[in-house]
Image (cartoon, rainbow, N blue to C red):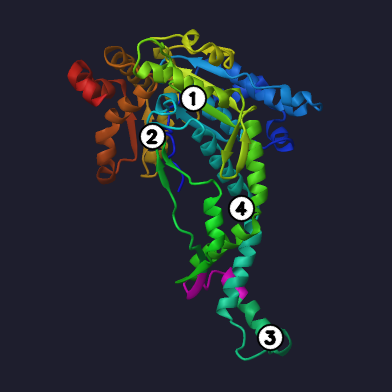
Amino acid sequence: MGEPKMKREQETPGVVVGEGLEERAKGLTPREIVRELDKYIIGQTKAKKAVAIALRNRWRRQQVKSDLRDEIVPNNIIMIGPTGVGKTEIARRLARLAQASFIKVEASKFTEVGYVGRDVESVIRDLTEIAVSMVRSEKVESVQQRAHELAIERVLDLLLPPVAGRIDEEAEEPESRPKTRERLRDMFLAGKLDERVIEVEVQRSAAPFVEVFTSAGVEEIDFNLQEALSGMFPKRKKRRKVKVKEAVHLLEQEEAQKLVDMDEVISEAIGRVQNSGIVFLDEIDKIVGTETSGGPDVSRGGVQRDLLPIVEGSNVMTKYGMVKTDHILFIAAGAFHAARPSDLIPEMQGRFPIRVELDSLTKDDFERILVEPENALIKQYAALLETEGVEIVFEEGAVKEIASFAVLVNERTEDIGARRLQTVMTTLLEQLLFEIPETKPTKITITAEIVRDTLKEIVEDEDLSRYIL
């Protein structure tokens, strides 16, 4: 159901509306936001400052009491820099910090109306879908305890069904039944009933799956049609025989959904999108082109014009209702090797007033990226091997060698920034990771010599390094 989601890549390191946003962002000054970003991203101070100010300004806007609040629009940002230097990671970490709905899309995946490609408004529909999922998850979590209690009661009902043939169970129930129920409850809480098999009824919707293919891909037919069809078809129940422990889990999910007010979820989600949503437009430089050469260049200019309304501020219909884009923060990024931000159409340039250039990564940066961030690669591998009961230690010389090899391969082949560290580490540890379950060492020390011996031959063979690294 719905259209395919845009490609959302997993990068290597390189909010609720109104009072909710205030609570989440309260106390986070720009300096503190930068400090939080420093935990995951090395360097790039200028870019961190720009996004920190942008986030703080969103909180400041919420404090404006007059009608002027609606006139204060976000200062959208263009990040300029090569791949793998942390552009996407900065935007993603900012969104997590603000607990805002976030989507990354590649601008090059869009084409102007009339060409086969993505509809630009689908970005806002996908962002709204993400926000609804976020808010629903939060609401479900908030009622989980109550849902768990209700699920237990339903399981006890199944274990101790009402006495057959009685009209008023409360009045005519034997005195021993309440005591029996309490004994069953105690047994359940003690885990003594976990393996008992019972039959439960769970609901499932009988609404059909509806899609239509258009020139812009798979689209939803009328955003509320699925909901309308769901109301026309009765809820079907499915009976399953499961163990008591699993039954509680199934019924807990069902009860949690009943306790969550979806109208409230949708209202809050739309507010969150409109006031704290973040759209990251990657490869913005790929839609920069002249209007005179024909072919794809014409389409590039058309894409900019199609994107312009949602960046400027417009209303986009989603299956949850109308969403205003006036206060969504747009962060664009691109390498801009063959073009400049000034090559964008003037209207688009005006909507991205903040421009920051990210620095290329040095060997020292690579060394720090390997060990300093909270999600550093070396920490990740240490955690993975700890599951096998193995301690892995990287000597300082080994870290320097890994960084050196990464820089060297980036110079000889395509420069993919910090992502090169991932390929180098994978190649370095491949054999070790393969053998550990059988050899069962307790501690492994990676030295500079081990790094050189493992990677030297691959790096020296340029054709091989292009293939492997």
State if disc 3 and disc 4 touch (CB < 8 Å).
no
The residue that appears at 62% across and 74% down in the rendered structure is 185
SS assignment at label 1: strand
Sequence order check, earlier mark of 3 and 2: 3
For this rendering, which residue is in front, 135 or 455?
A: 135
The amino acid pointed to by label 1 is Leu
Checking the image for residue 140, the label placed there is 4
SS assignment at label 3: helix
The residue that appears at 57% across and 16% down in the rendered structure is 352
Sequence order check, earlier mark of 2 and 4: 4
Q: Which residue is mark 3?
A: 169
Q: Mark 4 or mark 1, which is nearer to you?
A: 1
Callout 4 environment at 10 Å: few (<14), some (14 to 19), or many (20+)? some
Q: Is residue 83 left or right of residue 64?
A: left
Sequence order check, earlier mark of 2 and 1: 1
Checking the image for residue 217, the label placed there is none
SS assignment at label 4: helix
Q: Which residue is mark 2?
A: 381
Q: Mark 2 or mark 1, which is nearer to you?
A: 1
Q: CA distance from mark 3 to mark 2?
A: 60 Å
The amino acid pointed to by label 3 is Glu
Q: Which residue is mark 1?
A: 281
Up/down of 448 relative to 215, above or below: above
Callout 3 environment at 10 Å: few (<14), some (14 to 19), or many (20+)? few
Question: Which corner quadrant holds the C terminus?
Answer: top left
Question: Magenta stretch containing residue 450, yes or no?
Answer: no
The residue that appears at 72% across and 33% down in the rendered structure is 22
